[in-house]
Amino acid sequence: MKINRLVVEILIPTVKRGIRNRRKTFPPMGVFKEFLDVPYIDDGDSYHQYDVFLATENRKNVCILDIHGGSYLFSGHRDNYIFAYEFLKEGYDVICLDYLPNDGKRDTKDLVSDCVLCLNHIYEHLKDFSLEDDKFVMTGDSAGGHFALLLSEMMEDKKIQDLLGFNLHNFNLRGVLLNCPVYDFEWTGYNQMTHGAMKRMFGKNYSLEKMRLLSPKEYIKDFKLPLFVSTCKNDFIRKESLKLNEDMRQKDNKFVFIDIDSDNKKVDHVHNVVAPYLEESKRVNQKMFEFIETIIK
Protein backbone atom coordinates (compact mmCIF):
# COMPACT_ATOMS: atom_id res chain seq x y z
CA MET A 1 0.00 0.00 0.00
CA LYS A 2 1.31 3.45 -0.91
CA ILE A 3 1.90 6.21 1.64
CA ASN A 4 -0.68 8.99 1.35
CA ARG A 5 -0.56 12.65 2.33
CA LEU A 6 -2.51 12.16 5.59
CA VAL A 7 0.07 9.63 6.81
CA VAL A 8 2.84 12.09 5.94
CA GLU A 9 1.20 14.91 7.94
CA ILE A 10 0.74 12.63 10.98
CA LEU A 11 4.29 11.31 10.69
CA ILE A 12 6.08 14.67 10.84
CA PRO A 13 5.22 15.79 14.44
CA THR A 14 5.51 12.23 15.76
CA VAL A 15 9.04 11.74 14.45
CA LYS A 16 10.14 15.24 15.49
CA ARG A 17 9.04 14.52 19.06
CA GLY A 18 10.89 11.21 19.07
CA ILE A 19 14.11 12.84 17.86
CA ARG A 20 13.94 15.51 20.59
CA ASN A 21 13.40 12.87 23.28
CA ARG A 22 16.35 10.75 22.11
CA ARG A 23 18.65 13.74 22.05
CA LYS A 24 17.98 14.40 25.76
CA THR A 25 19.69 11.12 26.67
CA PHE A 26 23.06 12.21 25.23
CA PRO A 27 25.71 14.50 26.75
CA PRO A 28 24.95 18.18 26.17
CA MET A 29 26.87 20.22 23.69
CA GLY A 30 29.90 21.98 25.14
CA VAL A 31 32.09 18.89 25.58
CA PHE A 32 33.91 19.57 22.32
CA LYS A 33 35.16 22.72 20.63
CA GLU A 34 32.14 23.99 18.75
CA PHE A 35 30.97 26.55 16.22
CA LEU A 36 27.21 26.36 16.51
CA ASP A 37 24.48 27.62 14.18
CA VAL A 38 26.87 29.04 11.59
CA PRO A 39 24.72 30.71 8.89
CA TYR A 40 25.41 29.88 5.27
CA ILE A 41 22.44 32.02 4.23
CA ASP A 42 22.01 35.06 6.45
CA ASP A 43 18.22 35.02 6.76
CA GLY A 44 17.84 33.94 10.40
CA ASP A 45 16.37 30.56 9.43
CA SER A 46 17.82 27.76 11.57
CA TYR A 47 17.70 25.41 8.58
CA HIS A 48 20.20 27.69 6.84
CA GLN A 49 22.80 27.05 9.54
CA TYR A 50 25.24 24.27 10.37
CA ASP A 51 27.25 23.06 13.37
CA VAL A 52 31.00 22.40 13.48
CA PHE A 53 32.48 20.14 16.16
CA LEU A 54 36.22 19.55 16.67
CA ALA A 55 37.39 16.45 18.51
CA THR A 56 39.27 17.34 21.68
CA GLU A 57 41.04 14.03 22.35
CA ASN A 58 43.08 11.97 19.87
CA ARG A 59 42.06 14.34 17.08
CA LYS A 60 42.75 12.64 13.75
CA ASN A 61 42.33 15.66 11.45
CA VAL A 62 39.60 13.84 9.55
CA CYS A 63 36.30 15.68 9.15
CA ILE A 64 32.93 14.00 8.64
CA LEU A 65 30.50 16.05 6.53
CA ASP A 66 27.15 14.74 7.77
CA ILE A 67 23.78 15.29 6.05
CA HIS A 68 20.72 14.35 8.10
CA GLY A 69 17.67 12.52 6.80
CA GLY A 70 14.02 13.16 7.59
CA SER A 71 12.03 12.07 4.52
CA TYR A 72 12.78 15.46 2.92
CA LEU A 73 10.21 16.91 5.36
CA PHE A 74 11.71 17.38 8.82
CA SER A 75 14.76 17.18 11.10
CA GLY A 76 17.69 19.59 11.28
CA HIS A 77 21.41 19.85 11.88
CA ARG A 78 21.05 19.74 15.68
CA ASP A 79 19.17 16.43 15.51
CA ASN A 80 22.21 14.53 14.21
CA TYR A 81 24.33 15.49 17.22
CA ILE A 82 23.57 11.98 18.55
CA PHE A 83 25.36 10.52 15.53
CA ALA A 84 28.09 13.18 15.51
CA TYR A 85 28.91 12.33 19.13
CA GLU A 86 29.89 8.79 18.10
CA PHE A 87 32.48 10.14 15.63
CA LEU A 88 33.76 12.80 18.00
CA LYS A 89 34.54 10.19 20.65
CA GLU A 90 36.71 8.42 18.07
CA GLY A 91 38.71 11.58 17.32
CA TYR A 92 36.95 12.70 14.14
CA ASP A 93 35.81 16.26 13.55
CA VAL A 94 32.19 16.59 12.40
CA ILE A 95 30.13 19.16 10.54
CA CYS A 96 26.34 18.72 10.67
CA LEU A 97 24.91 20.27 7.52
CA ASP A 98 21.35 21.46 7.06
CA TYR A 99 18.79 22.33 4.41
CA LEU A 100 15.28 23.77 4.49
CA PRO A 101 12.86 20.80 4.31
CA ASN A 102 10.08 20.59 1.81
CA ASP A 103 6.67 22.05 2.63
CA GLY A 104 4.96 21.11 -0.61
CA LYS A 105 6.02 24.36 -2.23
CA ARG A 106 9.71 23.70 -2.80
CA ASP A 107 11.26 21.28 -5.25
CA THR A 108 13.71 18.61 -4.11
CA LYS A 109 16.29 20.41 -6.21
CA ASP A 110 15.88 23.37 -3.81
CA LEU A 111 16.99 21.09 -0.95
CA VAL A 112 20.02 19.97 -2.97
CA SER A 113 20.75 23.64 -3.71
CA ASP A 114 20.76 24.39 0.04
CA CYS A 115 23.26 21.57 0.57
CA VAL A 116 25.48 22.98 -2.20
CA LEU A 117 25.39 26.46 -0.64
CA CYS A 118 26.13 24.97 2.78
CA LEU A 119 29.12 22.97 1.50
CA ASN A 120 30.51 25.94 -0.41
CA HIS A 121 30.27 28.14 2.69
CA ILE A 122 32.08 25.49 4.75
CA TYR A 123 34.82 25.17 2.12
CA GLU A 124 35.37 28.92 2.03
CA HIS A 125 35.69 29.09 5.85
CA LEU A 126 37.80 26.00 6.60
CA LYS A 127 40.59 28.09 8.12
CA ASP A 128 38.11 29.77 10.46
CA PHE A 129 37.33 26.35 11.92
CA SER A 130 40.94 25.03 11.92
CA LEU A 131 39.93 22.41 9.35
CA GLU A 132 42.21 23.42 6.49
CA ASP A 133 44.49 20.41 7.10
CA ASP A 134 41.70 17.86 7.52
CA LYS A 135 40.81 15.01 5.18
CA PHE A 136 37.10 14.78 4.38
CA VAL A 137 34.51 12.02 4.31
CA MET A 138 30.85 12.54 3.37
CA THR A 139 28.06 10.75 5.20
CA GLY A 140 24.27 10.79 5.12
CA ASP A 141 21.27 8.78 6.24
CA SER A 142 17.99 8.13 4.42
CA ALA A 143 17.16 11.28 2.41
CA GLY A 144 20.51 12.64 3.63
CA GLY A 145 22.13 9.55 2.12
CA HIS A 146 20.54 10.48 -1.19
CA PHE A 147 22.01 13.98 -0.98
CA ALA A 148 25.42 12.79 0.28
CA LEU A 149 25.86 10.40 -2.64
CA LEU A 150 24.54 12.85 -5.24
CA LEU A 151 26.79 15.66 -3.96
CA SER A 152 29.78 13.31 -3.91
CA GLU A 153 29.04 12.32 -7.50
CA MET A 154 28.93 16.03 -8.37
CA MET A 155 32.31 16.61 -6.73
CA GLU A 156 33.73 13.72 -8.73
CA ASP A 157 32.28 14.86 -12.06
CA LYS A 158 31.71 18.50 -12.96
CA LYS A 159 29.56 17.41 -15.91
CA ILE A 160 26.88 16.43 -13.38
CA GLN A 161 27.10 19.87 -11.79
CA ASP A 162 26.67 21.48 -15.20
CA LEU A 163 23.73 19.22 -16.02
CA LEU A 164 21.95 20.12 -12.77
CA GLY A 165 23.02 23.77 -12.81
CA PHE A 166 25.26 23.79 -9.70
CA ASN A 167 28.75 25.03 -8.91
CA LEU A 168 30.18 22.99 -6.05
CA HIS A 169 33.63 23.17 -4.45
CA ASN A 170 35.56 19.90 -4.40
CA PHE A 171 36.62 18.84 -0.89
CA ASN A 172 38.83 16.10 -2.32
CA LEU A 173 36.75 13.51 -0.50
CA ARG A 174 38.40 10.29 0.67
CA GLY A 175 35.13 8.34 0.76
CA VAL A 176 31.39 8.23 1.41
CA LEU A 177 29.36 6.58 4.18
CA LEU A 178 25.64 5.91 3.66
CA ASN A 179 23.09 4.54 6.11
CA CYS A 180 19.79 3.26 4.66
CA PRO A 181 19.99 5.72 1.75
CA VAL A 182 17.54 6.65 -0.95
CA TYR A 183 19.38 5.58 -4.10
CA ASP A 184 16.89 5.26 -6.96
CA PHE A 185 14.95 8.47 -6.27
CA GLU A 186 12.52 7.87 -9.11
CA TRP A 187 11.58 4.41 -7.80
CA THR A 188 11.21 5.62 -4.21
CA GLY A 189 8.59 8.18 -5.16
CA TYR A 190 6.54 6.52 -7.87
CA ASN A 191 6.40 3.10 -6.28
CA GLN A 192 5.88 3.99 -2.62
CA MET A 193 3.73 7.14 -2.51
CA THR A 194 0.42 8.47 -3.72
CA HIS A 195 0.25 11.56 -5.90
CA GLY A 196 -0.71 13.75 -2.90
CA ALA A 197 2.14 12.46 -0.74
CA MET A 198 4.64 13.05 -3.52
CA LYS A 199 3.50 16.66 -3.95
CA ARG A 200 3.97 17.18 -0.21
CA MET A 201 7.38 15.52 -0.08
CA PHE A 202 8.99 16.39 -3.39
CA GLY A 203 7.24 19.60 -4.45
CA LYS A 204 4.18 20.37 -6.52
CA ASN A 205 6.22 20.57 -9.73
CA TYR A 206 7.83 17.15 -9.39
CA SER A 207 8.03 14.95 -12.49
CA LEU A 208 9.46 11.60 -13.46
CA GLU A 209 12.25 13.30 -15.43
CA LYS A 210 13.19 15.64 -12.55
CA MET A 211 13.32 12.74 -10.11
CA ARG A 212 15.53 10.77 -12.49
CA LEU A 213 17.95 13.68 -12.88
CA LEU A 214 18.24 14.01 -9.08
CA SER A 215 18.76 10.28 -8.56
CA PRO A 216 22.25 9.06 -7.54
CA LYS A 217 21.55 5.87 -9.50
CA GLU A 218 21.69 7.92 -12.69
CA TYR A 219 25.41 8.68 -12.24
CA ILE A 220 26.78 5.74 -10.28
CA LYS A 221 28.53 4.06 -13.25
CA ASP A 222 31.33 6.65 -13.17
CA PHE A 223 31.61 6.87 -9.38
CA LYS A 224 35.08 5.95 -8.14
CA LEU A 225 35.20 6.92 -4.45
CA PRO A 226 35.35 4.29 -1.70
CA LEU A 227 31.81 3.66 -0.45
CA PHE A 228 30.31 2.18 2.74
CA VAL A 229 26.59 1.28 2.81
CA SER A 230 24.55 -0.08 5.71
CA THR A 231 20.99 -1.35 5.87
CA CYS A 232 19.07 -3.92 7.93
CA LYS A 233 16.28 -6.46 7.75
CA ASN A 234 13.71 -3.97 9.09
CA ASP A 235 14.76 -1.03 6.93
CA PHE A 236 11.58 -0.06 5.06
CA ILE A 237 13.65 1.08 2.05
CA ARG A 238 16.12 -1.81 2.21
CA LYS A 239 15.54 -2.41 -1.51
CA GLU A 240 17.34 0.87 -2.20
CA SER A 241 20.52 -0.33 -0.49
CA LEU A 242 20.27 -3.71 -2.21
CA LYS A 243 20.08 -1.95 -5.60
CA LEU A 244 23.11 0.13 -4.74
CA ASN A 245 24.96 -2.98 -3.58
CA GLU A 246 24.18 -4.72 -6.87
CA ASP A 247 25.45 -1.78 -8.92
CA MET A 248 28.61 -1.32 -6.85
CA ARG A 249 29.51 -5.02 -6.98
CA GLN A 250 30.13 -4.59 -10.70
CA LYS A 251 32.80 -1.96 -10.02
CA ASP A 252 36.34 -2.06 -8.65
CA ASN A 253 35.84 0.61 -5.96
CA LYS A 254 36.68 -0.09 -2.35
CA PHE A 255 33.17 -1.01 -1.23
CA VAL A 256 31.73 -2.31 2.06
CA PHE A 257 28.10 -3.39 2.39
CA ILE A 258 26.55 -4.20 5.79
CA ASP A 259 23.09 -5.80 5.98
CA ILE A 260 22.09 -6.47 9.60
CA ASP A 261 19.85 -9.51 10.02
CA SER A 262 18.08 -8.79 13.31
CA ASP A 263 14.49 -9.35 14.46
CA ASN A 264 14.83 -6.62 17.10
CA LYS A 265 12.16 -4.09 16.07
CA LYS A 266 14.37 -1.23 17.25
CA VAL A 267 16.96 -2.22 14.66
CA ASP A 268 15.18 -0.55 11.79
CA HIS A 269 15.69 2.35 9.38
CA VAL A 270 18.88 4.34 10.27
CA HIS A 271 19.08 2.59 13.67
CA ASN A 272 22.81 3.25 14.01
CA VAL A 273 22.20 6.98 13.56
CA VAL A 274 19.25 7.47 15.93
CA ALA A 275 19.98 4.64 18.40
CA PRO A 276 23.76 4.08 18.44
CA TYR A 277 23.54 2.36 21.86
CA LEU A 278 22.01 -0.80 20.35
CA GLU A 279 24.46 -3.69 19.96
CA GLU A 280 23.68 -3.93 16.25
CA SER A 281 24.22 -0.18 15.88
CA LYS A 282 27.56 -0.39 17.66
CA ARG A 283 28.60 -3.10 15.24
CA VAL A 284 27.70 -1.00 12.19
CA ASN A 285 29.39 2.12 13.52
CA GLN A 286 32.55 0.23 14.44
CA LYS A 287 32.71 -1.11 10.88
CA MET A 288 32.28 2.46 9.70
CA PHE A 289 35.22 3.67 11.81
CA GLU A 290 37.37 0.82 10.51
CA PHE A 291 36.42 1.71 6.94
CA ILE A 292 37.42 5.35 7.46
CA GLU A 293 40.83 4.32 8.76
CA THR A 294 41.48 2.28 5.60
CA ILE A 295 40.63 5.15 3.23
CA ILE A 296 42.48 8.03 4.90
CA LYS A 297 45.93 6.45 4.89
Image (cartoon, helix red, strand yellow):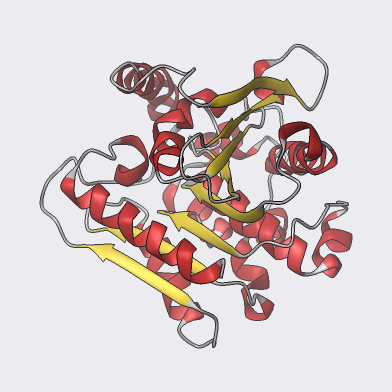
Percent of width and height locating residue 256: 40, 72
* Image height of 198 relative to 77, above or below: below
Tell me if 143 is positioned left or right of 134 in this view. left
Q: How many numbered marks appear? A: 0
* Image height of 143 relative to 191, above or below: above
Tell me if 50 is positioned left or right of 2 in this view. right
Percent of width and height locating residue 13: 41, 17
Q: Residue at x 51, y 46 (%)?
A: 92
Viewer-nearest residue: 193 or 162: 162
Percent of width and height locating residue 128: 79, 32
Residue 111: image quadrant is top right
Viewer-nearest residue: 104 or 220: 220
> Could you tell me if residue 208 is visible in this image?
no
Question: Which image quarter holds the C terminus?
Answer: bottom right
In the displayed image of the protein, which residue is found farthest to the front? 58
* Image height of 51 relative to 234, above or below: above
Q: Residue at x 20, y 51 (%)?
A: 280
* Image height of 7 relative to 42, above or below: below
Percent of width and height locating residue 122: 76, 38
Tell me if 276 is positioned left or right of 256 in this view. left
Residue 86: image quadrant is top left
Q: Residue at x 73, y 40 (%)?
A: 205
In the displayed image of the protein, which residue is found farthest to the left? 263
> Could you tell me if residue 262 is visible in this image?
yes
